[in-house]
Image: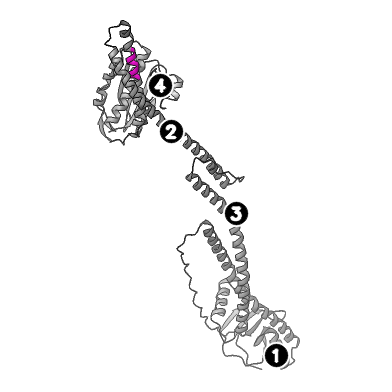
């Protein structure tokens, strides 16, 4: 029989092991695609989830292993309790201790203590584990110490007692516990890796099918369409999906169809414009020669020729102007404006001279103004001249009595100047209003080119302003709004 171990013996201090160094992921020089990044993110999340469950599982295994030994010790305590007053043979002690895998078993209850031990009791223990008061932190700390810093001295484990006794204490060697923990940790690690790989692979496949492949299909369609946007075969065919990716496919398909149609239309218009420019150039040369011949006809004394020649010359002159306007519109876009603080008074003072372009009397009234605008003086003058010329020619064609064009500049809002060009003619019909700023379509005057208003709108627009037609009955009023200079 050995010496009894004092139940109030202090446990030896626990020395924690050093923390494992975190490995810094190596950044590859090659770029990962969306699928590779998704795979790495999936693996990272699965590994984190496994770690959060792996560490507590190993720590709980240590507690369960010791709890099993305490349960076996409780059985031995029942044997001791049944042999009260009788000596316990060394053979029975050895069998009981071997069944518990302990150095000693102590049973306490009713103020008495029974002890089973074959070897002499050690003077100190390395650690004390009370299974009646276990926390998660102490469980993980104890498991870490057992695996990283094992001890040679025995550890004391205290557990609940049974019928007739209060508690059971056992002394255990830590080596079998550590061996069992390592075996369990390896088996759990293998199974966790299999589960993690399966989960990551499944999530990766699902993400590939549901997200990565459709997104790659969208990117491929965009790239292929950019290479040949007029090819209808490059337009994406939407799938039957009703989620966000399906909506993106529908939107992309609509955009590609609209853009392809617009590009084809612009290409046809460009080809048509080039042909019209060439025709207008040659036609202008022919008409210039005809105009010279018409000028000579005016010197003829024949009364019939004298009556017809002016009309012929006027018609040829209008045809030449039409050709020149077409060529001007078909040239390269207007130059960038040279924005300066431009006074309106000098530009407006030149507008009344445009009344001399027509035979029918038309008055061009300009209200005095000291306002300034931020614009290119030359381009602003051209835009106003186009508007006033159109108004004068419209009044001449309508033969309006008391025909008048009024030009005025006002400050209707802070930082903006409004220029109003108003005439008292019959106004514009609905058909003309719909295509007012479209080239070759907005003219309602015989012999007109339909280019004056589109050119004026372009000039005002590149100067940071707007050109609009005010709604109203009788006459027409165009409104130009520009930044104040």
Residue 321 to residue 3: above or below:
above
Sort mark 2 into few (<14), some (14-19) or many (20+) by Cα contacts within 10 Å: few
Q: Which residues are magenta?
A: 311-318
Decide if residue 330 is on the left or right side of residue 220: left
Q: Secondary structure at mark 1?
A: helix
Task: Look at discs 3 and 2 and give the one toward the viewer.
Answer: 2
Q: Quickly name the residue at label 1.
A: 94
- Please say if the residues under marks 1 and 3 sit with CB atoms less than 8 Å apart: no
Q: Secondary structure at mark 2?
A: helix
Q: CA distance from mark 2 to mark 4?
A: 23 Å
Q: Secondary structure at mark 4?
A: loop
Q: Position of residue 356 (x, y in %)?
A: 28, 16
Residue 352 to residue 153: above or below:
above
Q: Quickly name the residue at label 3.
A: 209
Task: Look at discs 1 and 2 and give the one toward the viewer.
Answer: 2
Name the residue: 60% across, 58% down: 205
Task: Look at discs 3 and 4 and give the one toward the viewer.
Answer: 4
Q: CA distance from mark 1 to mark 2?
A: 108 Å
Q: Quadrant of residue 51?
A: bottom right
Sort mark 4 into few (<14), some (14-19) or many (20+) by Cα contacts within 10 Å: many
Q: Which image quarter is the C terminus in?
A: top left
**What is the chief secondary structure element of the magenta stretch?**
helix
Q: Quickly name the residue at label 4.
A: 443
Q: Nearer the viewer, residue 448 or 246?
A: 448
Residue 110 seen in the current view: no
Residue 320 to residue 42: above or below:
above
Q: Position of residue 2 (x, y in %)?
A: 64, 93
């Amino acid at each position: 029989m050995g010496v009894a171990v004092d139940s109030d013996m202090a446990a030896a201090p626990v020395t924690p092991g050093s923390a494992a160094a975190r490995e810094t992921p190596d950044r590859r020089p090659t770029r990962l695609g969306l699928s590779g990044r998704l795979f790495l993110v999936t693996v990272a999340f699965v590994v984190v989830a496994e770690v959060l469950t792996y560490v507590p599982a190993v720590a709980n295994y240590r507690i369960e292993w010791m709890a099993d030994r305490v349960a076996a010790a409780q059985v031995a305590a029942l044997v001791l309790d049944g042999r009260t007053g009788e000596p316990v043979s060394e053979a029975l002690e050895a069998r009981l201790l071997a069944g518990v895998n302990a150095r000693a078993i102590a049973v306490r209850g009713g103020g008495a203590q029974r002890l089973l031990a074959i070897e002499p009791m050690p003077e100190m223990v390395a650690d004390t584990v009370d299974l009646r008061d276990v926390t998660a932190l102490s469980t993980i700390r104890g498991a870490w110490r057992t695996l990283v810093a094992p001890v040679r001295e025995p550890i004391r484990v205290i557990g609940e007692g049974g019928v007739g006794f209060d508690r059971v204490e056992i002394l255990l060697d830590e080596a079998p516990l550590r061996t069992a923990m390592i075996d369990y940790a390896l088996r759990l690690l293998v199974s966790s890796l299999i589960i993690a790989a399966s989960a990551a692979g499944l999530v990766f496949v699902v993400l590939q099918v549901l997200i990565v492949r459709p997104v790659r299909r969208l990117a491929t369609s965009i790239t292929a369409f950019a290479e040949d946007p007029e090819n209808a075969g490059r337009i994406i065919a939407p799938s039957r999906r009703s989620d966000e990716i399906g909506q993106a496919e529908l939107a992309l398909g609509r955009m590609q169809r609209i853009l392809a149609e617009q590009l084809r239309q612009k290409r046809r218009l460009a080809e048509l414009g080039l042909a019209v420019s060439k025709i207008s150039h040659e036609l202008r040369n022919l008409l210039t020669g005809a105009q010279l011949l018409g000028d000579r006809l005016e010197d003829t004394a024949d009364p019939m020729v004298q009556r017809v020649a002016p009309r012929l010359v006027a018609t040829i002159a209008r045809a030449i102007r039409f050709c020149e306007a077409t060529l001007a519109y078909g040239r390269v876009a207007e130059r960038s404006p040279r924005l300066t603080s431009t006074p309106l008074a000098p530009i407006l003072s030149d507008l009344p001279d445009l009344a001399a372009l027509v035979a029918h009397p038309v008055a061009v009234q300009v209200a005095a103004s000291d306002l300034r605008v931020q614009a290119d003086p030359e381009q602003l003058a051209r835009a106003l001249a186009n508007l006033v010329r159109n108004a004068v020619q419209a009044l001449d064609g309508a033969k309006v009595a008391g025909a008048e064009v009024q030009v005025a500049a006002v400050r209707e809002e802070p930082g903006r100047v409004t220029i109003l060009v108003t005439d008292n003619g019959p106004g514009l019909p609905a058909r003309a209003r719909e295509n007012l700023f479209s080239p070759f379509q907005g003219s309602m005057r015989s012999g007109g080119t339909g280019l004056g208003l589109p050119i004026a709108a372009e000039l005002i627009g590149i100067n940071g302003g707007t050109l609009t037609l005010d709604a109203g009955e009788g006459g027409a009023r165009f409104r130009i709004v520009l930044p104040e200079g």
